[in-house]
Image: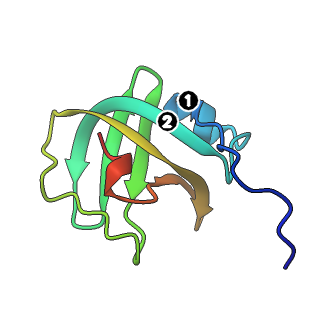
């Protein structure tokens, strides 16, 4: 592995759910704002004006959805991933859930 840069900020791209489904932002760091439609132990579903996207808490990130509730307005920053045919946003830490 070779380090090619340091000290640079990774741009956070504001997106809508529909943008994520296009595949254009796979592996990008994105930000989405919407309303919580479903809360499970390791994931939440967030709805914006274009659709609904899954936000998944990957093991090792220590992200918890315990304080999140249905109908809450939320902003999530995370990495776009395609898992078993389903697009999702994976927050890097609890600070990515606002």
Q: Which mark is residue 15?
A: 1
Report x, y in % for residue 74.
28, 34
Q: Verify CB contact (< 8 Å) between mark 1 and mark 2.
A: yes
Mark 1 or 2: in front is 2
Q: Quadrant of the N terminus?
A: bottom right
Residue linked to disc 2: 31
State the SS at label 2.
strand
Q: Residues within 10 Å of mark 1 (few under 14, many from 20)?
A: some
Q: Which image quarter holds the C terminus?
A: top left
Q: Residue at x 24, y 39 (%)?
A: 36
Where residue 80 appears, as percent x and y from the top left, is 59, 51
Q: Residue at x 32, y 59 (%)?
A: 43
| Residue 6 horizontal/vertical position (percent) | 74, 56
Q: CA distance from mark 1 to mark 2?
A: 6 Å
Rendered position, 90 above or below 15? below
Residue under the point 60% across and 45% down: 29
């Amino acid at each position: 592995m070779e380090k090619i840069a340091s000290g640079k900020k990774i741009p956070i791209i504001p997106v809508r759910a529909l943008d994520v489904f296009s595949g254009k932002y796979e592996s990008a760091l994105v930000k989405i704002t919407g309303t919580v439609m479903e809360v499970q132990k390791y994931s939440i579903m967030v709805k914006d004006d274009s659709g609904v996207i899954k936000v998944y808490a990957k093991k090792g990130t220590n992200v918890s959805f315990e304080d999140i509730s249905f109908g809450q307005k939320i902003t999530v920053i995370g990495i776009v991933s395609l898992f078993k045919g389903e697009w999702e946003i994976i927050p890097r830490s609890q600070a990515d859930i606002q």
